[in-house]
Amino acid sequence: MRTLERHKPMVGLGIGLLVASAAAGAWEVLALQSPGTPLYIGMLPGPIGALRSLALALGLIVLVGALLLTCNDQLPPRWAVLLLFVGSLASVGAQLYGAAHGMPGVQMVDFRPNVRPLFVTKYAGLGLVSAGLFEVARRLLWGARGGASVAAQLDSEERRH
């Protein structure tokens, strides 16, 4: 069970992204209501649906990565987890801003002044997430650079103490 402790940040990030996806789904249901109904909020449902989809996809990918790392006795490197956190926060935050202002965040050029920073922030965040996931995939395919598994590392620590 000691190996599971090191995977808690990734699992927490994945669960947090899934909760954000569920909240965005409820927000999207309100945005899809017909005008004149009591639940109508007068917002574009497209950018809100994009937020839901982005948070769901990132949450599932991070959870699957954490599960695979745990099953293969691999520790996620701290810098990769940091990239996943910062990238997820940047991309989901940018998409949240876009959803609140009716911008899908996929156009680089538009008549609104906030479109380019939104686009750059969202896709820079996704680039950071991709870099973190590449390191997770590298560890899964080829193992840690030192070559020792978590079980071997823990056994050597227990022998020292």
Image: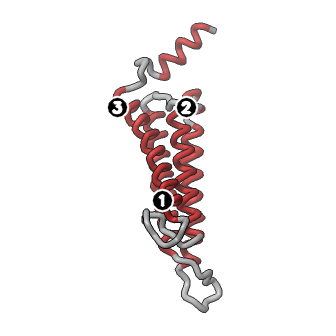
Residue denoted by label 3:
141
- Whether label 1 touches label 3, CB < 8 Å: no
Element carrying mark 3:
helix
Q: Position of residue 14 (x, y in %)?
A: 54, 48
Residue denoted by label 2:
78
In the rendered image, the vertical position of residue 27 relative to residue 138, given as above or below: below
- Whether label 3 touches label 2, CB < 8 Å: no
Amino acid bearing label 1: Phe
Element carrying mark 2:
helix
Q: Is residue 46 left or right of residue 42?
A: left
Frontmost residue, 115 versus 30: 115
**Sooner in the amino-acid sequence: mark 1 or mark 2:** 2
Farthest residue in the top direction? 160
Quadrant the N terminus occupies: top right
Residue drawn at point x = 58 percent, y = 27 percent: 2
Observer-side mark, 1 or 3, equals 1
Residue drawn at point x = 52 percent, y = 60 percent: 118
Residue denoted by label 1:
119
